[in-house]
Image (cartoon, helix red, strand yellow):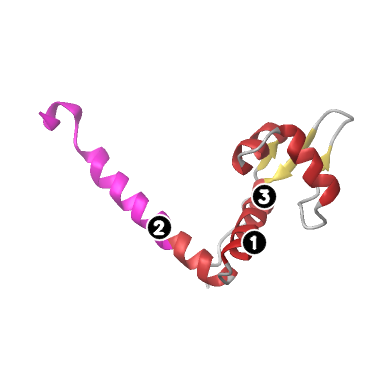
Amino acid sequence: MYAQEPNLKQIRLKTVADKLGCSVQRVYELMKEDKEFPIPTRYTARWVSFFECEIDAYIIKKAANTTGESIESLTERLLKASVFCYEYNKRVNKIKPAEVA
Protein backbone atom coordinates (compact mmCIF):
# COMPACT_ATOMS: atom_id res chain seq x y z
CA MET A 1 0.00 0.00 0.00
CA TYR A 2 2.77 2.46 0.87
CA ALA A 3 5.56 0.85 -1.15
CA GLN A 4 8.76 2.79 -1.13
CA GLU A 5 12.47 2.16 -1.09
CA PRO A 6 13.60 0.62 2.21
CA ASN A 7 15.48 2.89 4.58
CA LEU A 8 18.82 1.14 4.97
CA LYS A 9 20.32 3.89 7.11
CA GLN A 10 22.34 2.45 9.94
CA ILE A 11 22.40 3.98 13.40
CA ARG A 12 24.71 3.52 16.35
CA LEU A 13 23.86 2.14 19.77
CA LYS A 14 23.45 5.56 21.44
CA THR A 15 20.96 6.62 18.77
CA VAL A 16 18.99 3.40 19.32
CA ALA A 17 18.87 4.15 23.05
CA ASP A 18 17.69 7.70 22.33
CA LYS A 19 14.94 6.43 19.98
CA LEU A 20 13.76 3.95 22.62
CA GLY A 21 14.04 6.49 25.43
CA CYS A 22 16.30 4.29 27.51
CA SER A 23 19.93 3.83 28.45
CA VAL A 24 22.56 2.07 26.38
CA GLN A 25 22.72 -0.57 29.13
CA ARG A 26 18.99 -1.24 28.68
CA VAL A 27 19.54 -1.74 24.93
CA TYR A 28 22.14 -4.39 25.78
CA GLU A 29 19.58 -6.05 28.08
CA LEU A 30 16.94 -6.00 25.34
CA MET A 31 19.43 -7.58 22.93
CA LYS A 32 19.83 -10.48 25.39
CA GLU A 33 16.24 -10.78 26.71
CA ASP A 34 13.91 -9.92 23.81
CA LYS A 35 14.00 -12.38 20.92
CA GLU A 36 12.13 -9.83 18.75
CA PHE A 37 14.76 -7.12 19.23
CA PRO A 38 16.65 -6.39 15.99
CA ILE A 39 20.05 -8.02 15.59
CA PRO A 40 22.84 -5.49 15.11
CA THR A 41 25.47 -5.63 12.42
CA ARG A 42 28.88 -6.07 14.05
CA TYR A 43 31.79 -4.56 12.14
CA THR A 44 34.45 -4.83 14.85
CA ALA A 45 34.52 -5.80 18.51
CA ARG A 46 33.46 -2.26 19.47
CA TRP A 47 31.54 -1.08 16.41
CA VAL A 48 27.96 -2.21 15.94
CA SER A 49 25.06 -0.58 14.18
CA PHE A 50 21.38 -1.24 13.61
CA PHE A 51 19.17 -0.66 10.61
CA GLU A 52 16.98 2.27 11.57
CA CYS A 53 13.95 0.75 9.81
CA GLU A 54 14.19 -2.36 12.02
CA ILE A 55 14.32 -0.24 15.18
CA ASP A 56 11.31 1.78 13.99
CA ALA A 57 9.41 -1.43 13.19
CA TYR A 58 10.26 -2.80 16.66
CA ILE A 59 8.92 0.36 18.31
CA ILE A 60 5.68 0.24 16.28
CA LYS A 61 5.18 -3.46 17.02
CA LYS A 62 5.70 -2.94 20.77
CA ALA A 63 3.37 0.09 20.76
CA ALA A 64 0.67 -1.89 18.95
CA ASN A 65 0.99 -4.77 21.43
CA THR A 66 0.81 -2.36 24.36
CA THR A 67 -2.27 -0.50 23.12
CA GLY A 68 -4.02 -3.56 21.69
CA GLU A 69 -4.22 -1.80 18.35
CA SER A 70 -3.39 -3.62 15.12
CA ILE A 71 -0.05 -2.77 13.53
CA GLU A 72 -1.89 -1.65 10.39
CA SER A 73 -4.18 0.67 12.35
CA LEU A 74 -1.31 2.15 14.35
CA THR A 75 0.80 2.63 11.23
CA GLU A 76 -2.10 4.38 9.47
CA ARG A 77 -2.60 6.66 12.49
CA LEU A 78 1.11 7.50 12.62
CA LEU A 79 1.18 8.17 8.88
CA LYS A 80 -1.72 10.62 9.17
CA ALA A 81 -0.06 12.37 12.11
CA SER A 82 3.22 12.54 10.22
CA VAL A 83 1.56 14.07 7.14
CA PHE A 84 -0.27 16.57 9.34
CA CYS A 85 2.98 17.61 11.07
CA TYR A 86 4.77 17.94 7.73
CA GLU A 87 2.02 20.15 6.27
CA TYR A 88 1.80 22.23 9.45
CA ASN A 89 5.57 22.81 9.56
CA LYS A 90 5.58 23.70 5.88
CA ARG A 91 2.97 26.43 6.51
CA VAL A 92 4.60 27.74 9.68
CA ASN A 93 8.07 27.91 8.16
CA LYS A 94 6.79 30.10 5.29
CA ILE A 95 6.26 32.88 7.81
CA LYS A 96 9.49 34.80 8.26
CA PRO A 97 10.41 35.99 11.78
CA ALA A 98 9.94 39.67 10.72
CA GLU A 99 6.33 38.95 9.71
CA VAL A 100 5.34 37.50 13.09
CA ALA A 101 5.07 40.94 14.77
User: Callout 3: helix, strand or loop?
Assistant: helix
Tell me the CA gap for discs 1 and 2. Answer: 17 Å
- Residue 55: which numbered mark, if any? 3
Q: Residues within 10 Å of mark 1 (few under 14, many from 20)?
A: some
Residue 40 visible in the picture: no
User: Callout 2: helix, strand or loop?
Assistant: helix
Q: Is residue 80 above or below residue 28?
A: below
Q: Position of residue 32 (x, y in %)?
A: 85, 46
Residue picked out by circle 2: 81
Q: Residues within 10 Å of mark 2 (few under 14, many from 20)?
A: few
Of mark 3 and mark 2, the one earlier in the sequence is 3
Q: Position of residue 62 (x, y in %)?
A: 65, 58
Tell me the CA gap for discs 3 and 2. Answer: 19 Å
Q: At label 1, which amino acid type do we have? A: Lys
Query: Which residue shows up at 84% across the image and 35% down it?
Result: 43
Q: Is residue 95 above or below residue 34?
A: above
Q: At label 3, which amino acid type do we have? A: Ile
Name the quarter where the C terminus is drawn: top left
Of mark 3 and mark 1, the one earlier in the sequence is 3
Which span of residues is magenta-colored? 80-101
Q: Is residue 16 above or below residue 46?
A: below
Q: At label 2, which amino acid type do we have? A: Ala
Query: Which SS does the magenta portion mostly show?
Result: helix
Tell me the CA gap for discs 3 and 1. Answer: 10 Å
User: Callout 1: helix, strand or loop?
Assistant: helix
Query: On the picture, is 33 further left or further right than 14?
Result: right
Residue picked out by circle 1: 61
Pick whichever, 68 or 37, lies toward us.
68
Q: Are marks 3 and 1 in contact (CB under 8 Å)?
A: no
Query: Which residue shows up at 78% across the image and 46% down it?
Result: 30
User: Does 83 appear in magenta?
Assistant: yes
Q: Residues within 10 Å of mark 3 (few under 14, many from 20)?
A: some
